[in-house]
Image: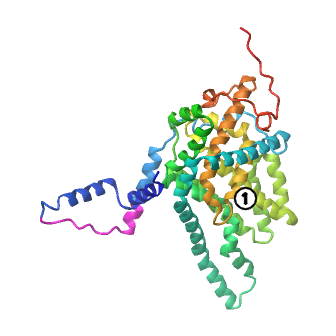
Amino acid sequence: MEYYSQAIDLVKTTFGGSGGEAKIEEEVTTTTTTTTTTKVKSPKTLKSVIGSVKETIENDAEKNKSQRLNEGGSVKKLKKVSDRKTPFSGGFYVKLVKGGYCFLKGTYVTFKEEKVIKAFLSTLKIILFGVLASYLVIFFMTFPIRLFVSFLTWIGISHLESIDEMLDTKQVIDDIAYFIPLVVVGTLRYVVPSFNEDMFFFVLESQDKKLFSYLKDSKILKTYPMIGYLKRFSKLAVMGILVMIFGYIPYIGDFVLAVAQFYYSYKPLGQGTAFVLSLFSLYSPTKRIAANILKTSMAANSLGKELLEVYFMRLPDYKQELYIYRRFYGWIFGFSMLWTTVLRFPFVGAIFWGIAQGSTGFLILKLLQRNKLKYDNKETEVVLLGQDQLSDFQEDSSSPLLTSKKLNLKTKVN
C-alpha cells in the first residue's frame, strides 16, 4: 500500500498536464535516438495550470454522478421512511450511549488490527502535511489584516484590540479546529482514494468475514466528486468565518449567532432544540456555551456523514441512507461527536483519522445487527444492504447496544 506514491502520482497528473501531453512527451523521449531534433517543452504558465485543475474537477464531477434510486428526490417525502429521536426524547440519550460504546470498542478493535497500524503509519506524512498546510493558510490569510489593524492603531485609531485578538493565529485555530479533520478527509479521499476503504474493510474483515466479502464486492453506485466536497466544505468554512467575525460585533453579533444556531441545528436536532439553543445564544452568560454547541453540532454531523460514506456509496437506494440517519441518529451523533473531540486537538488530533475510519466499520456492523433484530421482531420493514449477509452472532448481555430494549423474537412453527 504505497499511499504516498498514490499522492505523488495524483499531483503529477493534476498539475503536470493531460494524459495526451504526457504520452506525446514520452514518444519524443523514446525517439530521440532516431531523430536529429527534439522538442523542448515550454514551462507551464499559471493560466494553464488553473485550466488543468478546472478540467480535472469538471471531469471528476461528470464521472462520479450517483446511480442510486431516489437520489435528488424530495427529502421531505423521503424522511417518512423512519421517525427520529431528538434531544427532547429519552431514547436519544440511550442511542447516544450506544454511539459512545461503538467509539470505545471500535477504537479498541481497530488498534488491534495489524493491517490498520501499518496503513496508519504509511500515511502519517500526508496527514501531517495537510494539517501543517491548513495552519499556514490561516496564518497567511490573517497576517495582512492584522498588519493593517496594527498600522491603524499606530496612527491613533483605537478600539481595534478585539479585532486583532480575533485574528490571532492561535485564536483562529482554536475557533476552526473542529473543522480541520474535514480538510484531512478531503486530502485523503481525493489524494489517496483507497485509504478510507482500506481502513474500513480491514476492521470489518476482522469482525465479520461474510459481511466484509459481500460489501467489498458490492457495486459502488455513488462516488466522491471533488467539486461536491469543495462546495460543501467552502460553504461550511465561509459561514463559520462570517459567524465568527460578526460574533465580535456588539449587539449584532448576538443575533447573528442566534440565527446561525437555529439554521444549523434545526435539521439534525429538531426545531425545539434549535429554538432553545438560539435563546441561549442571546443570553451573555451562556453565549459561549451555545457557540461551542453550535460548532460541535456542525462538525459532528459533517464528520459522521464523511465517515459513513464508504458504506453509503454502495447503497442501492437513497432511502436507506436517510433511514440510517433518522433511525440511528443519536447513535451516529454520539460516535462522531467523540471522534470530533479527539480529532480537533491541534497538531496531533487529525493523525487519528485512519483509526476513526476503521472504527466506523465496527459501527456499521452493530447498526446492521441492531436493524436485523428489529426486522426479525417486525419493528421495521427496511432491510439494509448487507443485513442478510451477517454471520451468526450472539446477543452480548454486557453490551448496551443490543439489550437496551428487550426484543420478543418470535419463532415460526412449521
Q: Amino acid at mark 1?
A: Lys
Quarter occupied by the C terminus: top right
Q: Identify the colour scheme used.
A: rainbow
Which residue is label 1 attached to? 295
Q: Position of residue 326 (x, y in %)?
A: 72, 38
Element under disc 1: helix
Q: Position of residue 72 (x, y in %)?
A: 58, 39
Q: Residue furthest top?
A: 414
- Residue at 55% x, 32% y is 214
Query: What's the magenta region?
Result: 36-51
Where on the picture, by quarter, is residue 408?
Answer: top right
Q: Is residue 177 left or right of residue 86?
A: left
Q: Position of residue 405 (x, y in %)?
A: 82, 32
Q: Is residue 296 above or below residue 365?
A: below
Mark 1 crowdedness (10 Å alpha carbons): few <14, some 14-19, many ≥20:
some
* Front in this rendered view, residue 265 or 209: 209
Q: Is residue 175 magenta?
A: no
The answer to whether any part of residue 81 appears in the image is no
Q: Is residue 340 above or below residue 160?
A: above
Q: Is residue 271 left or right of residue 109?
A: right
The answer to whether any part of residue 150 appears in the image is yes
* Front in this rendered view, residue 239 or 302: 302
Q: What is the number of callouts on the image?
A: 1
Q: Is residue 291 above or below residue 159?
A: above
- Residue at 66% x, 85% y is 150
* Front in this rendered view, residue 332 or 237: 332
What secondary structure predominates along the stretch shown in magenta?
A: loop
- Residue at 76% x, 42% y is 98
Q: Position of residue 299 (x, y in %)?
A: 68, 55
Q: Residue furthest bottom?
A: 155
- Residue at 55% x, 67% y is 133
Where on the picture, by quarter, is residue 238?
Answer: bottom right
